[in-house]
Amino acid sequence: MKNRFIRCLPVFCSLALTACASSAVSGIHVPGESRIILKNLATEYYAVADGYLEIKNYAKAAEYYKLAMRNKDLYLTAYYKLARSYALAKDWENATESYEYLLSLDPENTMIRMSLAYITAMKGEVDDAIMKYRALLEQDPYDENLLENYVALLINVGRGEDAEENFFILKEKFPDNKQISTFAQKLAEIVDNFDPDKKIELPSPPEEEAQSAGGEKLPPPPETH
């Protein structure tokens, strides 16, 4: 894939130069021609960026996603992939700025909030990252991906007791999670008398508590996009 992608680059550049040169030679400019050319180039930039992303050249992918953003129809999609490229390249400052902008456009988007929590942790701002994860868990305490990432973070920063508590929630709710055995091994190293087979009783979700108490059914949580 890498070789095929690299071979395509000269073809793309040649096509771009040919489009510009033919317009200059004719001396005749069709109304909207420049806009169409730029739009087509932006689409090609986006494809090139995807190619770089696929071969894990994240810094180069970011460069081309920025060029693709010149097409307003691609702007948000390219911006999201730009943010992801920064994160994968471990460019935490640019990743933070990009995801914060995306969050300003969609404040309830759980995936963007999770990404920001992860990036915050990677920047070394552990307490802030934990607060972000806890806020997400208050909204959705039984999200498998969220729980898995939170347990991983707590283990990595040595917060054994908190990691243990959330490990058992993850194990009870999602026994087939692929990280269970790995987490158990790591917790045995940082928590005294850790017992991975201990049974716990999960708290009832608020809606179930209200119904069992004969109260009114609580409204559903806000939808995320």
Image: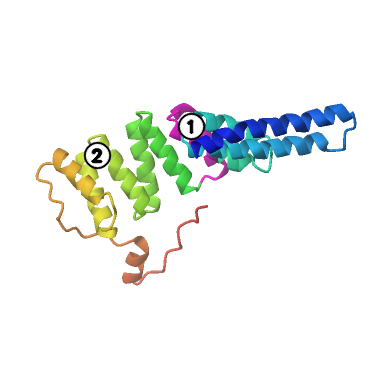
Name the outermost residue toward the right. 28
State whether residue 146 is above or below residue 71: below
Badge 1: residue crowd in 10 Å (few <14, some 14–19, many ≥20): some
Badge 2: residue crowd in 10 Å (few <14, some 14–19, many ≥20): many
Residue type pointed to by label 1: Asn
Residue type pointed to by label 2: Ile
Residue in front for this viewpoint, 112 or 128: 112
The residue wearing badge 2 is 155
The verdict on residue 94 being magenta is yes
Q: Quadrant of residue 217?
A: bottom left
Would residue 40 be found to the left or right of residue 76 on screen?
right
Q: Disc 1 on helix, strand or loop? A: loop
Q: Quadrant of residue 125?
A: top left
Is the stretch drawn in magenta largely helix, strand or loop?
Answer: helix
Residue extent of the magenta highlight: 81-107
- Residue 16's spot in the image, x, y percent? 71, 32
**Residue 57, which numbered label?**
1
